[in-house]
Image (cartoon, coloured by chain):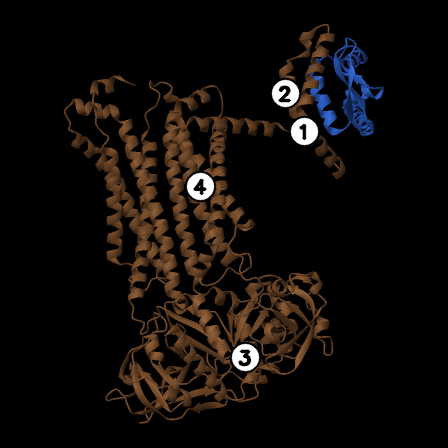
Amino acid sequence: MSVRSTTAEWVRRFWYLLNRGRLEDALRQEMEAHRELMGEPVRFGNALRLREQSSDVWGWGWLDALVRDVRFAVRGLRRTPVFTIVATLSLALGLSLTTSTVSIVNAYLIRSLPYAESDRLYHVRYAPPGPWEPTGMTALDWSSVADVVEFPISASSESFYVGEGGYAQALRGLRVTSGFVEGLGVGVAAGRGLVAHDFAAGSEPIALIGHALWRDRFGSDPGAIGRLIRAETESRPGTAETFRIVGVLAPGFYFGRDRTGIDLLVPHPAPIRTYMVRLREGVPPAAAERRLTDAARRAATSPIPNGWSGVQLDSARDRWLGSLRPVLYGITVAVGLVLVIVCANVAVLMLLRSMQRQKEVAVRLALGSGWRHIARMLLTETAIICVIACGAGIAITAVLLGILSPAIETQLGRPAPSAVGITIDTNVATIVGGISLLAAIALSLIPLTSWGRRVTNALQQDGRVATEGLAMRRLRSGLIAFEVAGSLVLLVGCGLMVRSVVKMMNTDLGFDPAGLNASRITLRARNYPDPAAYRAFHERFAARVTTVTGSKVVFSSWPPFVPPPEHLIAADAGEASISAGTIAVSAGYFSTFGIAITQGRQFTVEEASAEAPVAVISETLARRLWPSGDALGRRVRDVERTQGGSTPGPWRTVVGIAADVRQTYDDGDRSDFYMPRTPDGRFGTFYLRSNQPGPGLFDHFQRAAAEVDRDAVINPPHLVAQDDRTLVESRFLTWMLAGFAAIAAFLAMLGIYGVTAYAVQQRQKEVAIRTALGASQRALMGIFLREGAVLLGVGTAVGLLGGAATSRVLRNQVFGVQPFDAATYAIACALLLAAGFLAIFTAARGVSVANPVKALNSN
Amino acid sequence: MLILRVLAAGPLHGYAIAQRIHVLSREELSVEEGSLYPALQKLLLKGWVKASPAISETGRAVREYKLTLAGRKQLELERANYRRVTAAIGAVLDTA
């Protein structure tokens, strides 16, 4: 049949659907009129059957059946309101937790970086972390590796200063090559993007402005496109460049480690040193590393030292996710477990309810409805509950995420990749919808298993409620035991994480991050003719801030919680050199950071100013350099590995020995070497210990800086403790696991209580007989307690096995605690068993029959 | 097919169609007259006939069915098919 006729047929079908009432009425009248006209009306046939056949021709029979099923299911659900409400609420809670977790995982793992083909993006490392890199990398011949590298993504940051006098604004700029635009896929919100022509020599200088800049400085005016903007650059002070604005970047576009966004994007025709590449499809990074190493060797303009590890490629996505991936997996598994426990609870409820419907089902079967029909009815009921629960769950989550999303992003240490943040998008909705569907199907099958062949026997029994079979009891017990097991697994995981976090918090890092604030200064080169001028600024700035806030300001060349660059340290007696982390710090660093000086003293201000030839070394380094004797007063020097060999520093006298500092929790090498220095360049990072909140401090910093140099730019301070990613992430995981474990345990206890109470009610006759025979209440309770104990026991045993599996999975997240830590297991078991027995006890307490005879006589 | 042929002469309502088939077939074909109506619905679905309101001889509201252009084409198609099949059957019966 042709497409046109099929479409026409569907149009006619829909038209029938919309006008159904009218058309069916007309048919009925028609058929009646026909019968009237006939001599022998008998020959007409069964009018009802013929009308139904006529109706079926149009193909909407399935819709009718569905509507009927839904109406019937709703009626059935309304008859047992308690079950319906409890089941819907439990599922809504479970689905809400699931939706939150899926949203977070979607935002960080699935949606990933906001660049095109982000799985092929790699960071390029020419040398291990530290100051040395091969020179001449700007001239690396990218066309020679064009078969493995699709785009070299080169960008160099630039500070632009726009406007004169009072309203000067420092803009974060980025000069990019053509590979940047194509490799990352720069999206524009208005105007146009960069095209190849813009990179040709001699073309008009153009720029793209950032979305925030467009909004704040130009009021989101579309007329801003085409205007000229005049900016002074840091690299060429005194001269201004004029750019024509051709487009506005998409909101949320950022590049680089600090995701503060880009204000000005400018094409740069000349080659720039490239730190990011996009590989061609199917090229393994190892192969690309080899090719790039060769190309780097060819391009290097100075000799490369032996032992150079070559060019390394780090996946952009992995570097950005960092340690977050296992945390996310952990939460996903935990929430999956909670959802399964919720479903098990609802399944038990459905089993109990199905008990009451045995007679109804038996009657229907006797009347000729097949099993498929019964199954469809069950599925409809479960589907309605699941749909409502899914909708409610998503709605709750949407509200929760709206409130909690910024807090979550702070905890995880990095904002969600795209500007949208953690939201519920089509991915999340599809996944959660699919899960709800699976749950609905699984749950609807449960009562079916319990009915089976015995259902027809139900008709022969008196009483409203039939007694249950062994299979049903086993199934119910199995579900509850499974819930107990699941709760135990979560409790064990939570317990391990709690102990791990406590251990971490009790670990002596060697310094005290509490209350320590960090911030960055950026100065304009044109105001400072030489390093001494920079030093003067920093000293005056530090003095001003100290006066205002009352706390000392110290500078350091390297942030805490990051392993510092390694230099070789040589001792004066000629022993072998030892590798140690080297940091340049200002006076008062050790006292501000809380690092104990075990011998000697700290640096003085004069020493820091003059970069005097003194040094402070850590205890471990002192022990390794001079195992026998005293390190104070001895001479050391550091050897910095640079291009073309190594530059030994001046001989320094050891004036102090500091306690060992761990930069990470498993920092093996605690040898550290400190040199005195006040920052003598454009950039400096300073630290201050204060209890004042961030905005207040920021205010002080800015005012103090403005008093010394109006053009200085200070970044808002942040707490150093937030940089302790391991601790923060572990704490986050612990809180999540604790919440999930609590919910799971609560549900399991509720389940146990419910089943025991139900059993008590079911076995009233048996209880009545026993009472009549003289059993005490305690003995009766004992029966139920014993049965409940078996359930708990089985559940705990299975849970311990599951807990062992969890421990293996959590191995990498756990610090200082053995994965099979007996204490954690014991405590978790004890807690769960205690709660379980409490639940059983409370339920069994209701066992007592006032009048056994009456109970025996009733149905 | 028979309904289509009957309607080729002009629009009719349900009873009239049944009468005409009965008469034309020289009273050979007689089935449940009501089974006409499901067949008419199928023709309506396929777009081979169109229905419009009318009044019967007794003054009742009925629907008149009219053959469409597509219906005429379908009639010719089915006629040709029927003739071909009949000829084939006839050939087998005559020779075997």
Name the residue tied to disc 1.
Answer: A18
Q: Earlier in the sequence, mark 2 or mark 4?
A: 2
As shown in the figure, which amino acid type bears the numbered disc 1? Leu
Calculate the distance from the C-alpha at mark 2 to the C-alpha at mark 4: 40 Å
User: Do badges 1 and 4 share one subunit?
Assistant: yes
Name the residue tied to disc 3.
Answer: A293
Q: Nearer the viewer, residue A246 or A551?
A: A551
Q: Secondary structure at mark 4?
A: helix
Name the residue tied to disc 2.
Answer: A52
- The reply, left or right, for residue A300 in relation to residue A642 is right
In this view, A482 is above or below B3: below
Q: Secondary structure at mark 3?
A: helix
Q: Chain of mark 2?
A: A
The structure residue drawn at horizontal position 50% and vertical position 90%, both measured from the top left corner, is A644
Q: Chain of mark 1?
A: A
Write down the quadrant of residue A515 in the picture: bottom left
The structure residue drawn at horizontal position 41% and vertical position 28%, both measured from the top left corner, is A80
Q: Nearer the viewer, mark 4 or mark 3?
A: 4
Name the residue tied to disc 4.
Answer: A92
Calculate the distance from the C-alpha at mark 3 to the C-alpha at mark 2: 79 Å
As shown in the figure, which amino acid type bears the numbered disc 3? Thr
Chain letter matching colour brown: A
Q: Secondary structure at mark 2?
A: helix
